[in-house]
Image (cartoon, coloured by chain):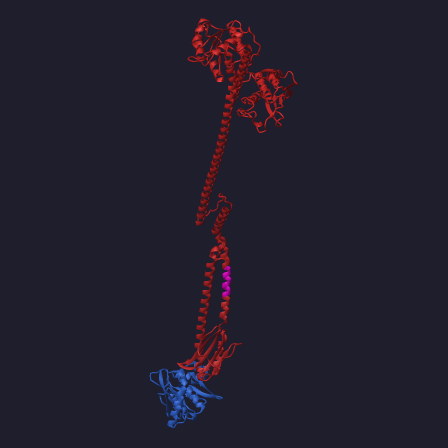
């Protein structure tokens, strides 16, 4: 089913003139999948909005990959959606800040106090207040998590996800 | 294999006890074992299922976020589960993603099996790895079941051992308990077998129990009682029946024998009567014939003399015959009485030889007498012994043909042995045993050569035995003669039994003065008898008056009381008894005490007693010896005189 969706996404992406699936690097295909999967391992305090919105800040590096991944998929009983945003918004459930986007810290500030799962790929992303940060261990994509940041945002990250992540403590810094 | 029906009762009981025990134990144990295995397998299933549920849940994230190292790490936890052979994780593409294998176990298969498999040695579980309803991969786990098998083996072994112990215990218990049933039954069976083999119905089965077997045993014993009673009764009835049959047979035999004896006795009697008739007629013929001749007046003196001689001889022969008959009668009725006194056997033999000498001479026989002892004194009845000797001698003379020889010997040997040997034809061997039997003669036919009644030897034997002696006859061969031997014991004087009458010695010479002066009254209805007595007594010098009836006798006595009365007994109107009764009723002066003599043909001892009872002093049997009567009269008169004086 996932394969079929992926194929559909690729076809749609080609039609829209956005970067085709084969143009998207293996790195972002993995990261798109990870983004989608993170949603599964995180619980939001309020799920009455009717959908989970994954926002991509600035420039979209996934092409149509992410959109096709989440299309028609339901997590926690609600459908998923993705949008590319150019400024901080309050309705994002997940906020991904690619390394190419400018003003990451502004986005982070904008999300502060909101139940938004912030995911970045810049080296010191979680130290800056982000919740999940991608990093590369050779060829493998890995991630680190700042559980305190998530807790402050009233997000509950599954212990199974935490088990796979490198845990970064920022509590002392906050105090 | 013997069918259960034919097994001995001990084994039946043992089987009866064991079979349910073993069956129950086996069923229970097997059930328990199966239940245990089922439970264990279910537990294993639950356990493995739980394993296959918990582990994959944690693995979903690791697969999703591509962390096979994490998967391996999680699978490594299975190390604490000793029965897990291996566990494998496959991703969505079906590729092996993570693995765990116990040491020495095979690795994971290239692809996951399609479904769960509860095999004999392994339990394989396949489970999807999902997170939030989304499949992330496949989990596969193989559980080793050999520990279950081991447990099965150990359990079975335990059950079998327990079973053996239980069977042994049950056997021991059954062995003890079955005795209460089997032993009385076996005893019963044994008793039945012994009774049937020995037919001894006194054997009894033992039973002390009050259960059904006891009832059977008691019933069996009662049955034996009945059988024993019945058998005893049967046997008793049988014995009685046999006795009865024997008794009947014996009675029948006796009856046949008695009949035979009777027939024989009748035959002998007929023969005897024929003989008797003949013997009585023969002399009678001579007497009557000569009597007729003598009545004719033409007879001269010589003829008269010959006739009288013949009449006397024949009459004597007849008297002898009748005497013999009476003798036999006395012997047969056991009333033979011996007049025992001291005697000289030699003298008796001499006298007897003198008597038969004329007959012997007439047949020209050589008569030799050898007497070794003289005198041969002993006690005995001289008349009877003379009778015996005369019988033997006259037989010898009679049976010896002319010119033969007769030898008489008297020797002493313990007692006296008299032998009479003749040279006659002897006695046939088959007749020898009966030679001393009464009424037996070697030749009983009417044409026989020798006359006689055949009573002589029978009487001789009885007389000799009455003297305590023996008589034997021998005859070696026919024509070698017969030999008679008489043995008489030598009895000394003084040992004679008391009460035996001793008779006055008799004298054959007529003493014409013996009765001189004696008045005798003779009463007899028969004139010949009256005449004979008158003649006889007159010869001795008595004065004899004769009357023919009792009435006449009484008249005669009225006229003159006689010294002695001689009366017949059997008379018409009034008999000798009446006479004496009437006479004894009179006073002595009218003849009430006259000595009386009964002269009668009624010669039995009963008659003798009857005559004495009415008052006769003496009894004389007809025919009588004249001298005897004379001497008797003399004696009576003498004693009467002695009493009178």
Coordinates of residue B442 in the picture (x, y in percent): 56, 26
Query: Which is more toward the observer, A126 or B293?
Result: B293
Residue B448 lies in what quarter of the image? top right
Q: Residue furthest front?
A: B298
Look at the image and say whether residue B463 sits in the magenta stretch.
no
Coordinates of residue B166 in the picture (x, y in percent): 49, 59
Q: Determine the colour of chain B.
A: red
Q: Main secondary structure of the magenta part?
A: helix
Query: Which is more toward the observer, B315 or A93?
Result: B315
Q: Residue furthest bottom?
A: A17
Q: Residue at image x 38%, y 95%?
A: A17
Question: Is B84 situated left or right of B378 in this image?
Answer: left
* Image position of B171 with respect to B293: above or below: below
Query: Which is more toward the observer, B434 or A14?
Result: B434
Q: Which residues are magenta?
A: B156-165
* Image position of B224 with respect to B151: above or below: above
* Image position of B504 with respect to B227: above or below: above
Q: Determine the colour of chain A.
A: blue
Coordinates of residue A129 in the picture (x, y in percent): 42, 87
Query: Which is more toward the observer, B378 or B360?
Result: B360
Coordinates of residue B532 in the picture (x, y in percent): 50, 11
């Amino acid at each position: 089913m996932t394969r079929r969706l992926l194929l559909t996404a690729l076809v749609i992406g080609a039609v829209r003139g956005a970067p085709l699936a084969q143009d998207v690097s293996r790195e972002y295909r993995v990261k798109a999948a990870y983004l989608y999967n993170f949603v599964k391992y995180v619980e939001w305090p309020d799920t009455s909005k009717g959908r989970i919105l994954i926002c991509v800040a600035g420039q979209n590096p996934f092409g149509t990959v992410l959109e096709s991944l989440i299309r028609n998929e339901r997590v926690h009983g609600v459908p998923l959606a993705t949008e590319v945003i150019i400024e901080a918004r309050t309705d994002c459930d997940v906020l991904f800040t690619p390394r190419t986007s400018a003003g990451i810290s502004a986005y982070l500030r904008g999300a502060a106090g909101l139940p938004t799962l912030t995911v970045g790929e810049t080296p010191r992303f979680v130290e800056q207040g982000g919740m999940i940060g991608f990093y590369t261990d050779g060829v493998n994509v890995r991630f680190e998590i700042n559980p305190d940041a998530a807790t402050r945002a009233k997000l509950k990250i599954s212990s199974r996800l935490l088990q796979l992540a490198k845990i970064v403590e920022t509590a002392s810094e906050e105090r | 294999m013997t069918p259960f029906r034919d097994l001995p009762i001990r084994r039946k009981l043992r089987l009866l006890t064991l079979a349910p025990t073993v069956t129950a134990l086996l069923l229970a144990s097997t059930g328990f074992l199966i239940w245990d295995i089922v439970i264990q397998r279910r537990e294993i299933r639950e356990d493995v299922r739980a394993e296959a549920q918990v582990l994959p849940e944690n693995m979903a994230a690791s697969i999703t976020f591509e962390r096979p190292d994490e998967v391996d790490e999680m699978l490594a936890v299975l190390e604490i589960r000793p029965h897990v052979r291996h566990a494998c994780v496959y991703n969505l593409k079906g590729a092996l993603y993570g693995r765990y294998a116990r040491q020495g176990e095979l690795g994971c298969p290239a692809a996951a099996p399609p479904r769960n498999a509860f095999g004999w040695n392994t339990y394989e579980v396949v489970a999807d790895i999902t997170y939030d309803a989304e499949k992330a991969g496949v989990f596969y786990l193989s559980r080793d079941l050999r520990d279950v098998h081991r447990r099965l083996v150990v359990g079975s072994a335990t059950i079998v051992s327990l079973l053996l112990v239980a069977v042994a215990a049950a056997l021991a218990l059954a062995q003890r308990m079955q005795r209460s049933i089997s032993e009385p039954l076996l005893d019963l069976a044994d008793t039945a077998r012994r009774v049937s083999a020995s037919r001894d119905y006194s054997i009894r089965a033992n039973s002390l129990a009050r259960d059904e077997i006891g009832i059977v045993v008691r019933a069996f014993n009662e049955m034996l009682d009945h059988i024993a009673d019945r058998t005893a009764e049967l046997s008793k009835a049988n014995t009685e029946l046999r006795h009865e049959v024997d008794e009947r047979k014996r009675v029948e035999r006796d009856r046949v024998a008695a009949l035979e004896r009777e027939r024989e006795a009748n035959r002998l009697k007929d023969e005897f009567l024929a003989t008797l008739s003949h013997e009585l007629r023969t002399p009678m013929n001579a007497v009557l014939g000569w009597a007729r001749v003598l009545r004719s007046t033409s007879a001269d003196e010589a003829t008269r003399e010959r006739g009288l001689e013949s009449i006397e001889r024949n009459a004597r022969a007849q008297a002898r015959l009748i005497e013999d008959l009476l003798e036999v009668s006395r012997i047969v009725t056991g009333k033979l009485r011996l007049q025992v006194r001291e005697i000289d056997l030699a003298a008796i033999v001499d006298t007897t030889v003198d008597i038969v000498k004329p007959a012997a001479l007439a047949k020209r026989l050589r008569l030799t007498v050898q007497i070794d002892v003289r005198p041969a004194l002993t006690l005995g009845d001289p008349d009877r012994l003379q009778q015996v000797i005369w019988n033997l001698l006259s037989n010898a003379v009679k049976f010896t043909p002319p010119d033969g020889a007769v030898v008489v010997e008297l020797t002493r040997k313990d007692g006296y042995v008299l032998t009479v040997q003749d040279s006659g034809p002897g006695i046939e061997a088959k007749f020898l045993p009966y030679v001393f039997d009464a009424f037996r003669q070697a030749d009983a036919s009417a044409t026989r050569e020798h006359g006689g009644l055949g009573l002589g030897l029978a009487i001789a034997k009885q007389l000799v035995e009455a003297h305590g002696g023996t008589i034997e006859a021998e005859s070696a061969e026919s024509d070698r003669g017969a030999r008679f031997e008489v043995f008489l014991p030598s009895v000394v004087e003084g040992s004679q039994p008391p009460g035996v009458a001793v008779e006055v010695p008799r004298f054959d010479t007529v003493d014409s003065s013996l009765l001189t002066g004696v008045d005798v009254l003779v009463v007899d209805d028969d004139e010949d008898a009256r005449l004979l007595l008158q003649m006889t007594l007159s010869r001795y010098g008595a004065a004899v008056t004769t009357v023919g009836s009792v009435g006449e006798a009484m008249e005669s006595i009225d006229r003159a009381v006689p010294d002695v009365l001689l009366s017949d007994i059997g008379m018409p109107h009034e008999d000798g008894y009446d006479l004496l009764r009437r006479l004894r009723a009179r006073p002595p002066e009218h003849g009430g005490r006259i000595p009386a003599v009964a002269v009668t043909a009624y010669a039995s001892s009963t008659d003798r007693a009857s005559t004495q009872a009415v008052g006769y002093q003496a009894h004389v049997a007809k025919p009588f010896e004249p001298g005897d009567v004379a001497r008797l009269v003399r004696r009576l008169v003498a004693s009467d005189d002695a009493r009178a004086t």
